[in-house]
Amino acid sequence: MNVSWFDGSSMYQIFPLGLCGSPHENSWDWSNTWNAASRPVRRVDRILNWVEHLKKLGIKSIFFNLALQSDTHGYNTRDFYTLDSRLGSNEDFAEVCKVLHDNGFRIVFDALFTNVGRGFWAFRDVRANLENSKYIDWFKDIDFKSNTPCNDGFYYKAWKNNWDFPELNLDNEDLVQHIFGAVRKSEDLYRFDGFRLCLQEYLPKKFVKRFRKLCLDMGAGLGGSISLVAEMFDGIEAEKYIGRYQCQSAENRELRDSICNSFNRKNVFELAYTLNRQFGKDGIFKNVPMMNFLDNHNIARFASAVNDKSLIPLGWSLLPALPGFPCIYYGSEWGVEGWDEENHWVMRPAFEKPEWNELTDLIQKALAARNNSPALMYGDYKQIFQAKEQLVFERSSCGETIVVSINISEYDYKVPVKNGHGYAAFEGLHGDFLELLGGNECHYDGEFYMPPKSVMYLKRK
């Protein structure tokens, strides 16, 4: 597997149409025959209000959800070559990306190639010209002897039977070259450093292999290869979509769910099991820089998903200590809540500027500890103690070892020295340590105390 820059990153996710306060529906200009969009409105500059905030927070890369011309929410694409006019023009976004690169951030874009929207220019051509359209074979299973509830006069395959999403036929070489041309244009304009490859499990392996080669051949904005993160509809199958001819990383939905479940059930067994399965001695992601997150644009905010709100800081202080790299969804660093299964715009709110509070302070300290620790960025994972509400593990690399403990109980917990084998054994901590989150010096002669509802990063002095 080619080495990516993800290992040492700390990422921040922005849903541009939401953050920038764009209208939830695009407008049409029928004189614009390419994508029928109205004149661009420059809203994308609002992202620049986050530059100093993210530098202070300790963020190294920014992931933008889909911002291409679309019908409504970004994932019903109209045009692969043009920024959504609700955000501005291509040139407007290129200026924003240059500022971000000049401030040291790498940039990751969403890439959705399974489907487009009904407003996609080539699909509109099929609707207008029917059997005479040159683009029939760009879409799957078009049949002029059948129809759909949209009553276009033909049937087409739609992703998950959602008629808003006509599926693309990626076996069509003209379509593939059209997509690759858009990727090359975007790289010229924005100098991106990576892609999140949406719904990779629905993409043909041949296409993914060719897309990976295309990205490897193009120079990334800050040097090195353009790296790929896989997104799966079923996150438990992530290991199938990482490899030499696929992505270097994947979204870690399984880990996110195990954290939420463990916190809500007041039992860290699922979290411990998941960490061992993924990152332990024979872990399936032991050498993979997984993208770890607690919330995003499609699922409940962590502050809404956790029943005991006093545990919210524990989740965010734990995330940077885990193998892989942390990704923070905009607004969650100051505790924004939000969840609506029917209206996902609730998880994609508009903000004029970022906020900062005690939770942000804590996340800043955790990211600073990670950014300055080879053990936390690249180290092996080894569990050294587990009880019902307590977990202790260590990360080791380059001669450095960091012991990380989490106690989700409301009581102090004394971690006892145990004789035995495997997870039943704990030799204790011995010597002087610096607790990186609080800056406190500690000395242990075996047993040690974990404060209630706490996360500690213990570095041997």
Image: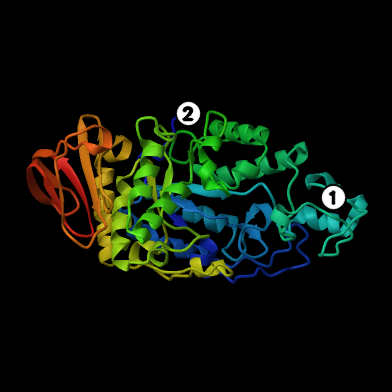
Of badges 1 and 2, the one in the foreground is 1
Residue found 62% across the figure and 63% down from its top: 85
The answer to whether 435 appears left or right of 88 in the picture is left
* Residue on which the image places disc 1: 142
Can residue 76 be spotted in the picture? yes
Can residue 60 be spotted in the picture? no
* Residue on which the image places disc 2: 2
Where in the figure is residue 78, as x and y percent of width and height? 70, 57
N-term-proximal mark, 1 vs 2: 2
Amino acid carrying mark 1 in the image: Ile
- The foreground one among 115 and 404 is 404
Number of numbered callouts drawn: 2
Residue found 27% across the figure and 57% down from its top: 408
- The foreground one among 243 and 46 is 243
Where in the figure is residue 57, as x and y percent of width and height? 30, 56
Where in the figure is residue 8, as x and y percent of width and height? 35, 40
Where in the figure is residue 55, as x and y percent of width and height? 32, 54
Residue found 57% across the figure and 30% down from its top: 245
Residue 79, above or below 250: below
Q: Quadrant of the C terminus?
A: top left
Residue found 40% across the figure and 32% down from its top: 287
Counting other residues with Cα less than 10 Å from the Cα at mark 1, is it few (<14), some (14-19), or many (20 or more)?
some
- The foreground one among 14 and 37 is 14
| Contact check, label 1 and label 2, Cβ < 8 Å | no
Helix, strand, or loop for circle 1? Answer: loop
Amino acid carrying mark 2 in the image: Asn
Counting other residues with Cα less than 10 Å from the Cα at mark 2, is it few (<14), some (14-19), or many (20 or more)?
few
Q: Which mark is residue 96?
A: none
Helix, strand, or loop for circle 2? Answer: loop
The answer to whether 78 appears left or right of 365 in the picture is right
